[in-house]
Amino acid sequence: MIKCIMFDIGGVLMEDFHNEYYCDYLSRLSGMPFDKTKDIINGREVSLGNMGMITKYELEMRLAERLGIKQSQVKWFELYKKHAKLNKPMFWLVKRLHRRYTTAYLSNIDRSKYEYTLKLFGPYLELFDYKFASFAIGMQKPYNAIYNYALARMHMDAGEVVFIDNQEDNVEGAREVGMNALLFKGIEELERELGRITRF
């Protein structure tokens, strides 16, 4: 029996354009190919930031060194603040689901972006019974530990949770621990998928 619907933030609750935009910005600035730039942004430095193991300053310093640009040009938080937007139809869906299910989010995110994101959520924040941010718990998706941590905190079995993410590896990570996991491709398809396995 499904008891909880859990969402990713970036690309699900928030519109997913920042990462592509940001990689394009850094690629043009550094002269590095887009794919190589994207590999750096998806690499160790950002993972350490997402797990709270380095500060935003340290993250920007390391990225600047890898990209061959000035630290002031990295604009890790500044560009996020400028372009981050809520995916508002998703919050209407969360509101509907919240009437019947426990609702939660689980995100790979560093402190600076998370604190700003909470401001954007505003009154919507009360729709989430549980809030899991990678930097605060020192773990990140798609590794099993973070899903198991969330399950333990919620006192739920994996089969009682539906997890929704726009990254295939994160969806697979959730499935590995036994969660019902859905790859987010848009709200209409998500509603159809949820209609098959829930009652909302």
Image: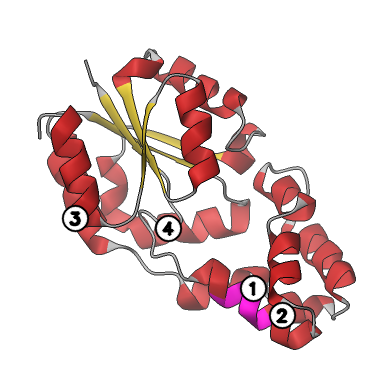
Residue 11 is labelled as 4
The numbered dot on residue 188 is 3
Name the spot of residue 17 as percent of width and height, x first: 46, 70
Calculate the distance from the C-alpha at mark 3 to the C-alpha at mark 4.
15 Å
Q: Quadrant of residue 64?
A: bottom right
Quadrant where the C terminus lies?
Answer: top left
The amino acid marked with disc number 3 is Glu
Q: Amino acid at mark 4?
A: Gly
Q: In terms of sequence position, does the residue under pointer 3 or pointer 1 come before the other?
A: 1
Q: CA distance from mark 2 to mark 3?
A: 33 Å
Q: Which residues are magenta?
A: 21-25
Magenta stretch: helix, strand or loop mostly: helix
Q: Nearer the viewer, residue 2 or 188?
A: 188
**Residue shown at the point (56%, 46%) measured from the top left:** 108
Which quarter of the rendering shows the N terminus? top left
Mark 2, secondary structure of its residue: helix
Q: Looking at the picture, which amino acid does disc 2 mark?
A: Ser
Q: Earlier in the sequence, mark 2 or mark 3?
A: 2
Of 152 and 184, the residue lying toward us: 184
Q: What x and y, as percent, mark residue 177?
A: 49, 20
* Residue at numbered disc 1: 23
Residue 101 vertical placement versus 192 (above, below):
above
